[in-house]
Amino acid sequence: MTLLRSLLFQLILIGSSLLYSLAILALGSGDSGRRAPRLARSWARLNLKALKILCGLDHRVHGLEHLPKDNAIVLCKHQSAWEILALRALLPPEQSWVLKQELIRIPVFGRALKRLRHIAIDRAAGRREITRLIREGSALLEGGHWVVIFPEGTRVAPGTQGSYNIGGALLAERTGRPVVPIAHNAGVFWGRQSLIKRPGAIDLVIGPTIRTQGRKATEINAEVERWIEQTLAAIQTQHRI
């Protein structure tokens, strides 16, 4: 039954992604460009509801009071596709994500991602792409967008930790914008390479805003990594009790 429900949800996720991509391309330029991010938020909320109804997978959000009023840089743990839905639904609509270039090449879906003003990078290009991330990220922050980055660069399994790339911290150093760290345990319920969505409740924790003005990127990155990994360990301990 769990497999069947997971398959049904996957069909809804794929189908809604196509339909909302078409809607963003057809309608997203309206309302001075604000309609596209609102459509994207609607897509995320629809799929979170479907996930709860079909798979019994809900979530709890802790630390909402830590979200600043003004836009910021979000550095989040990456364990599954769930956090893409959650952050898109949770944060203000004007979000720009740092994502892999291959996603932009997907027909229809990739064009919709472009309309949402994401930053598509070639992960193999190294320093050149970090320079572009800082340039484009700075402009988007100036324009009022939240910039969302997964510092580990790819999904990691629960209980493991990837290397925290410095690109997001460099953007924070250059712009002086605050960083919002986010930890969660989504991978326990929705594996990074698994079709199965297990019932339960994902815990997502928003950390206190990290001040970045006058600080080095290495210092910022170390604080983000320490907070996320310690918070994740605390979540896992609570679930074992």
Image (cartoon, rainbow, N blue to C red):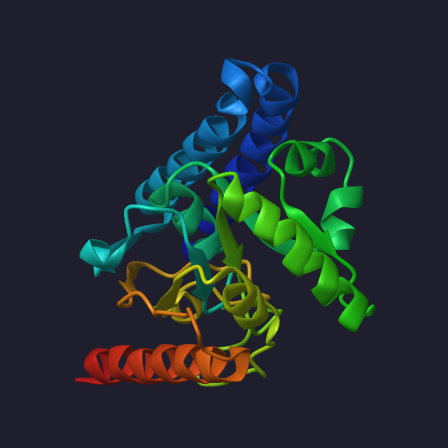
The image quadrant that residue 153 belongs to is bottom right
The answer to whether one can see residue 3 in this image is: no
Which residue appears at 69% of the width and 36% of the height? 114
Q: In which quarter of the view is residue 199 placed?
A: bottom left
Residue for point 28% across, 46% down = 69
Residues 240 and 128: in front is 128
Q: Position of residue 195 (x, y in %)?
A: 55, 58
Residue displayed at 31% across by 41% down: 53
Side of 134 where 185 appears, left or right: left
- In the rendered view, does 24 fall on the left or right side of 183? right
- Residue at the location (76% across, 66% down)? 123
Horizontal and vertical percent for residue 24? 59, 24
Q: State whether residue 45 is above or below residue 156.
A: above
Compared with 192, 224 (above or below) is below
The residue closer to the viewer here, 45 or 166, is 166
- Pick the residue in front: 87 or 172: 172
Give the total of numbered labels: 0
Give the left or right position of residue 144, taking residue 241 as reference. Answer: right
Q: Nearer the viewer, residue 193 or 133?
A: 133
- Which image quarter holds the C terminus? bottom left
Q: Position of residue 205 (x, y in %)?
A: 28, 65
In x, y percent, where is residue 143?
52, 38
